[in-house]
Amino acid sequence: MYAVVGCSDCGTLWLLVDPATSESAQCQRCGRTHQTARLKHLFESEDRAAAREARSALLAKKRGDSAAFADVDHVSELERQADTAAVDDEEYLEAAGIDAEAVAAAAESTGEQPSSHDDIVRAAVREAGENEQPAEAAIVAYATDRGVPAEKARKLLERLCREGEASKHDGRYRLL
Protein backbone atom coordinates (compact mmCIF):
# COMPACT_ATOMS: atom_id res chain seq x y z
CA MET A 1 0.00 0.00 0.00
CA TYR A 2 1.25 3.46 -0.88
CA ALA A 3 -0.11 6.71 0.51
CA VAL A 4 0.62 10.27 -0.53
CA VAL A 5 1.04 12.30 2.65
CA GLY A 6 2.14 15.82 3.46
CA CYS A 7 4.12 17.60 6.15
CA SER A 8 2.01 19.94 8.25
CA ASP A 9 5.02 22.22 8.81
CA CYS A 10 6.54 22.76 5.37
CA GLY A 11 3.91 21.27 3.02
CA THR A 12 6.21 18.74 1.37
CA LEU A 13 4.40 15.77 -0.18
CA TRP A 14 5.92 12.30 -0.25
CA LEU A 15 5.02 8.65 -0.66
CA LEU A 16 4.61 6.61 2.46
CA VAL A 17 5.07 2.86 1.94
CA ASP A 18 2.88 0.59 4.07
CA PRO A 19 1.67 3.31 6.45
CA ALA A 20 0.11 0.72 8.77
CA THR A 21 3.46 -0.95 9.48
CA SER A 22 5.43 2.09 10.65
CA GLU A 23 4.74 4.27 13.65
CA SER A 24 6.43 7.43 12.41
CA ALA A 25 7.70 9.11 9.28
CA GLN A 26 10.16 11.95 8.90
CA CYS A 27 9.81 14.81 6.44
CA GLN A 28 12.84 14.84 4.17
CA ARG A 29 12.71 18.60 3.75
CA CYS A 30 12.30 19.99 7.28
CA GLY A 31 13.13 16.89 9.34
CA ARG A 32 9.93 16.90 11.40
CA THR A 33 8.85 13.49 12.63
CA HIS A 34 5.15 12.68 12.20
CA GLN A 35 3.07 9.87 13.66
CA THR A 36 1.87 7.96 10.61
CA ALA A 37 -1.55 7.36 12.15
CA ARG A 38 -2.12 11.12 12.31
CA LEU A 39 -0.95 11.92 8.78
CA LYS A 40 -3.70 12.76 6.32
CA HIS A 41 -3.65 10.37 3.37
CA LEU A 42 -4.24 12.52 0.30
CA PHE A 43 -4.22 9.46 -1.96
CA GLU A 44 -3.92 5.70 -1.41
CA SER A 45 -3.17 2.91 -3.86
CA GLU A 46 -1.68 -0.55 -4.07
CA ASP A 47 0.16 0.59 -7.21
CA ARG A 48 3.32 2.66 -6.69
CA ALA A 49 3.11 4.23 -10.14
CA ALA A 50 -0.45 5.43 -9.46
CA ALA A 51 0.65 6.95 -6.15
CA ARG A 52 3.57 8.71 -7.85
CA GLU A 53 1.23 10.06 -10.50
CA ALA A 54 -1.20 11.32 -7.83
CA ARG A 55 1.65 13.04 -5.96
CA SER A 56 2.76 14.70 -9.19
CA ALA A 57 -0.79 15.91 -9.87
CA LEU A 58 -1.08 17.29 -6.34
CA LEU A 59 2.23 19.13 -6.67
CA ALA A 60 1.14 20.61 -10.01
CA LYS A 61 -2.17 21.72 -8.51
CA LYS A 62 -0.36 23.25 -5.53
CA ARG A 63 1.79 25.32 -7.90
CA GLY A 64 -1.12 26.29 -10.14
CA ASP A 65 0.11 24.16 -13.03
CA SER A 66 -2.78 21.70 -13.31
CA ALA A 67 -3.42 22.55 -16.97
CA ALA A 68 0.24 22.04 -17.91
CA PHE A 69 0.31 18.78 -15.95
CA ALA A 70 -2.72 17.50 -17.85
CA ASP A 71 -0.77 17.93 -21.11
CA VAL A 72 2.17 15.85 -19.86
CA ASP A 73 2.35 12.09 -20.35
CA HIS A 74 2.15 9.65 -17.46
CA VAL A 75 5.28 9.44 -15.28
CA SER A 76 6.17 5.98 -16.60
CA GLU A 77 6.01 7.30 -20.18
CA LEU A 78 8.27 10.22 -19.25
CA GLU A 79 10.78 7.78 -17.73
CA ARG A 80 10.77 5.73 -20.94
CA GLN A 81 11.32 8.88 -22.99
CA ALA A 82 14.19 9.93 -20.73
CA ASP A 83 15.83 6.52 -21.13
CA THR A 84 15.62 6.68 -24.91
CA ALA A 85 16.62 10.35 -25.13
CA ALA A 86 20.12 9.77 -23.79
CA VAL A 87 23.09 10.34 -26.08
CA ASP A 88 24.69 7.07 -27.15
CA ASP A 89 28.45 6.53 -27.26
CA GLU A 90 28.73 7.11 -30.99
CA GLU A 91 26.89 10.46 -30.85
CA TYR A 92 28.98 11.52 -27.85
CA LEU A 93 32.28 10.72 -29.55
CA GLU A 94 31.28 12.41 -32.81
CA ALA A 95 30.19 15.56 -30.90
CA ALA A 96 33.60 15.60 -29.20
CA GLY A 97 35.30 15.47 -32.59
CA ILE A 98 36.43 11.85 -32.25
CA ASP A 99 35.89 9.34 -35.05
CA ALA A 100 33.59 6.76 -33.45
CA GLU A 101 34.33 4.19 -36.15
CA ALA A 102 38.07 4.50 -35.48
CA VAL A 103 37.47 3.94 -31.77
CA ALA A 104 35.38 0.84 -32.49
CA ALA A 105 38.04 -0.45 -34.89
CA ALA A 106 40.79 0.12 -32.33
CA ALA A 107 38.80 -1.74 -29.67
CA GLU A 108 38.18 -4.57 -32.11
CA SER A 109 41.84 -4.85 -33.10
CA THR A 110 42.93 -5.20 -29.47
CA GLY A 111 40.19 -7.72 -28.77
CA GLU A 112 38.98 -5.60 -25.86
CA GLN A 113 35.63 -3.99 -25.42
CA PRO A 114 35.49 -0.33 -24.38
CA SER A 115 35.45 -0.13 -20.59
CA SER A 116 33.15 1.78 -18.32
CA HIS A 117 34.49 4.85 -16.58
CA ASP A 118 34.60 2.85 -13.32
CA ASP A 119 36.71 0.16 -14.94
CA ILE A 120 39.08 2.73 -16.42
CA VAL A 121 39.67 4.39 -13.03
CA ARG A 122 40.23 0.98 -11.41
CA ALA A 123 42.71 0.08 -14.16
CA ALA A 124 44.48 3.41 -13.61
CA VAL A 125 44.98 2.64 -9.93
CA ARG A 126 46.05 -0.94 -10.70
CA GLU A 127 48.42 -0.10 -13.55
CA ALA A 128 50.07 2.89 -11.92
CA GLY A 129 50.35 0.86 -8.72
CA GLU A 130 52.54 -1.77 -10.41
CA ASN A 131 55.46 0.67 -10.36
CA GLU A 132 54.54 2.63 -7.27
CA GLN A 133 51.38 3.53 -5.44
CA PRO A 134 49.73 6.09 -7.72
CA ALA A 135 48.93 9.68 -6.82
CA GLU A 136 45.63 11.24 -7.85
CA ALA A 137 47.24 13.22 -10.67
CA ALA A 138 48.61 10.06 -12.30
CA ILE A 139 45.27 8.27 -12.02
CA VAL A 140 43.35 11.21 -13.45
CA ALA A 141 45.84 11.57 -16.32
CA TYR A 142 45.50 7.86 -17.17
CA ALA A 143 41.70 8.08 -17.08
CA THR A 144 41.48 11.28 -19.15
CA ASP A 145 43.74 9.69 -21.79
CA ARG A 146 41.05 7.00 -22.10
CA GLY A 147 38.07 9.33 -22.36
CA VAL A 148 37.02 9.86 -18.75
CA PRO A 149 36.51 13.54 -17.87
CA ALA A 150 38.97 14.64 -15.16
CA GLU A 151 36.30 15.69 -12.65
CA LYS A 152 34.42 12.41 -13.12
CA ALA A 153 37.66 10.46 -12.61
CA ARG A 154 38.23 12.28 -9.31
CA LYS A 155 34.66 11.58 -8.16
CA LEU A 156 34.94 7.92 -9.12
CA LEU A 157 38.23 7.66 -7.22
CA GLU A 158 36.59 9.21 -4.14
CA ARG A 159 33.67 6.80 -4.47
CA LEU A 160 36.01 3.80 -4.69
CA CYS A 161 37.61 4.88 -1.41
CA ARG A 162 34.27 5.64 0.25
CA GLU A 163 32.89 2.23 -0.74
CA GLY A 164 35.99 0.41 0.48
CA GLU A 165 37.23 -0.76 -2.93
CA ALA A 166 40.36 1.40 -2.70
CA SER A 167 42.34 3.11 0.02
CA LYS A 168 44.22 6.37 0.22
CA HIS A 169 47.27 6.92 2.41
CA ASP A 170 49.61 9.92 2.17
CA GLY A 171 48.06 10.96 -1.15
CA ARG A 172 48.63 7.52 -2.71
CA TYR A 173 45.91 5.05 -3.78
CA ARG A 174 45.69 1.29 -4.01
CA LEU A 175 42.91 -1.15 -4.75
CA LEU A 176 41.79 -3.42 -1.93
Image (cartoon, rainbow, N blue to C red):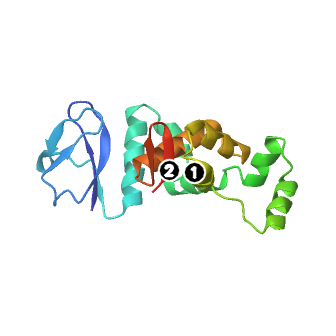
Residue ID at (41%, 58%): 49
Callout 1: SS: helix
Residue with the mark numbered 2: 174
Callout 2: SS: strand
- Does 89 sit above or below residue 169? below
Position of the C terminus by quadrant: bottom left
How crowded pointer 2 is (Cα within 10 Å; few <14, some 14-19, many 20+) is rated as: many
Q: Nearer the viewer, residue 70 or 38?
A: 38
Q: Residue furthest bottom?
A: 111
Sequence-wise first label, 1 or 2? 1
The quadrant where residue 114 appears = bottom right
Amino acid at circle 1: Gly
Residue 1: x, y in percent?
27, 62
Which mark, residue 129? 1
Along the horizontal axis of the image, is 160 left or right of 125? left
Along the horizontal axis of the image, is 71 left or right of 51? right
Q: Residue furthest front?
A: 131
The answer to the question of whether label 1 and label 2 lie on touching residues, with beta carbons closer than 8 A, is yes
Q: Nearer the viewer, residue 113 or 94?
A: 113
Amino acid at circle 2: Arg
